[in-house]
Image (cartoon, rainbow, N blue to C red):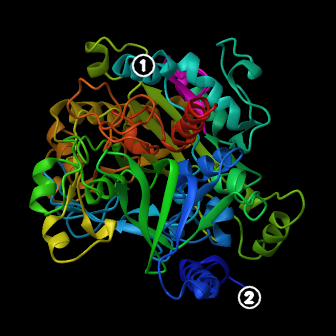
Amino acid sequence: MLTNTFLTGAATIQLILSYYANYYNQTDLAATLEEMKPDFGLPKIEIFDFVIVGGGTAGCLLASRLSERYTVLLLERGGPPPPPTKNPYYGYQIEQHPGFNDHFSSTPQKGIKGADGGNSRHLKPLQLNNVTTGRMLGGSGSHNGNIYNRGSPHDYDNYAKLFNDESWKYENILKYYKRFESFGGIVFGDQNITRSDYFGQSGPIHVETNLPPILPTWFQAGIELGYKVQDPNALQEESFTPMVKSAKNGRRSSTYTGYLKKIMGTRSNLRVLMYSDVDEVLINENKTAYGVVYKRHGMPQIAHASKEVILSPSTFTTPIILIKSGVGPKDVLLKAKIPVKHHLPGVGKNLRDHAGVFLEFTATNSSDELLPVVSETGLEKELLKFQSVESSGFYSRNDLGHAQAFFVSQVAKKRGQTGWPDIQVVFKQTARVGKKSPQRVTMHVIVNRLESQGEVIFDTDKYLQGVRDAVELAKIDYNLLTDEEDRLVLMEAINHTLKIMEETTPMRALGMNFTQAIPSVCQTFPYRSPEFWTCYMQQMAGSWWHQSGTCKMGQKSDEFAVVDSKFRVFGINKLRVVDASIYPVTLNANINAATIMIAEKAAEDLFNEYAS
């Protein structure tokens, strides 16, 4: 009998991914060698209007938009995403594979310790482990959870204030969201929201609302606690909401699938080079960026940009490339013996992230409100449904056991931030094949506006030893939960979750019991005491993989700002940064949608600047 483990188990998927990683690399290498024959093995200098470094979420969009008018070179460190990325069902297996990801580890952490005797959310004792970013076209947008949250209007209004630039207010950035959205979802709530006013209808990114069987139960629990049911994106506020995803019928929608893939090979003015790792930005004596040095399959190459160089690799690697190019903290550059092109002390600083814990519950009363279990014998039927034109069934509904709620913490209220959520609680039940009851639910309990700040540290010792790979040179210090108020907010988030799952009538009817395994070191404290939860947070908390801030946007008067409100690097002409690293503080949202938005905004800024 065909079993789920045989067909779609982790070992099977890892084998398939390994085959594709090798196949894509070797195929591209063969084409590269054939193309380079006339160059006699010497670097060939090519000239483009724009050179974009990094083919992730922002880079794919920028390459598509800018090539509407200009010549563009897009350099991507990895290859194309493998076929399993099309269905978010395989996201976790893909994000672990070294053929499609860059893997980072952190320095020893102070605010979190890692569970004794095992791993928790990417943690081992004293060290964040296995935090990855996608190394493929589309970047992490090609394997993430596809959660589509814009954030609160207050997030963007705050940016406008920090940047002294009204174009960043929510009412003004809304057009960029609408530009890329093709919203096929349902608008919930009583906010008098008109679809056309708040959502795009014909953009390249499909956005849909998840409607799992649990959703009415989730809403009822929120109403019982005194909260509204609202839309998570139009005007995010303290409420219970559905989960919205960038997908259609179970198929991922990313900037690679929506923007780049359909034009690759159709525009003579767009060149996309994969397996091309940028070593440094070329900057002349006038502090003007004019190109990059990169390695294509390890072979040195040079590209010049007549207009600008745009960095869009990732929050972790963008600051490393800047430092290798002579732009960053002077003391680091001098220690690494890198010629100082411009002293920018904020490069690599201000690492921001979301942090949280998992809380597991088990429903003792099996119910149709929870996702059904697919039998082993029914698996073939489900595969046929998904592969049909309609793309229906189990595989088209992965993670439809999702719902969420947003809360404003007491800490935020004391800061005068009433109406600006900083807590996100996610209900997640993933459909399983061949698994019997009891039915388990994992609650994601997340603090989204942390005060704790970390940094990406440039490893000068490795650099002096000859290491040039940006991933190897990056030491990540998250510094998560070192701020006391962050810990208070997470404690409050845990209490919100327990109240939802244990005290509301709808959840009690499902027989929800707290069944989370507790680290042994925490069992010495009175059960559920403040000391117990403090220990639990220290042992089990971790990054939620929404990193930003290491090349933060700000005003010139801010010593640690790296780029201005038009994405331009301070002190260097014709060099911009367009990726999540520019956000000075995190949004109350998963960060992928906001990264797509800034790429649309940056493209418009560039069109306006070079219109003549």
Q: Is residue 227 visible?
A: no
* Image position, residue 292 (x, y; %): 42, 61
Q: Can you tell which of label 1 and label 2 is closer to the viewer?
A: 1
| Number of callouts | 2
In the image, farthest residue toward the right: 389
Please give the label number shown on residue 1: 2
Pick whichever of labels 1 and 2 is earlier in the sequence.
Answer: 2
Depicted 123 relative to depicted 510: above or below: below
Most distant residue in the front direction: 285
Task: Judge by depth and name the residue closer to the eye, 205 or 463.
Answer: 463
Question: What amino acid type is highlighted by mark number 1?
Answer: Ala
Q: Give the percent coordinates (x, y) of residue 30.
A: 62, 88
**For residue 237: magenta?**
yes
- The image shows residue 548, relative to residue 372, as above or below, that is above
Q: Is residue 223 above or below residue 579?
A: above
Image quarter (top left, top right, bottom left or bottom right) of the N terminus: bottom right
Residue range in magenta is 221-243
Residue at 19% across, 47% down: 479
Is label 1 in a helix, a strand or a loop?
helix
Label 1 packing within 10 angstroms: few (<14), some (14-19), many (20+) = some
As rendered, which of 255 and 82 lies closer to the eye?
255
Q: Where residue 531 sits: x, y (%)? A: 14, 41
Residue 466 visible in the shown view: yes
Image quadrant holding the C terminus, namely top right
Q: Which residue has dot 1 on it?
A: 160
Tell me where residue 474 appears, x and y as whole percent: 26, 62
The crowding category of the residue bearing disc 2, from other C-alpha atoms within 10 Å (few below 14, some 14 to 19, many at least 20), is few
Amino acid type of the residue tagged 2 in the rendering: Met
Which residue is painted at 19% across and 52% down in the image?
A: 340
Dividing the picture into quadrants, the one containing residue 3 is: bottom right
Q: Residue at x 70, y 41 (%)?
A: 207
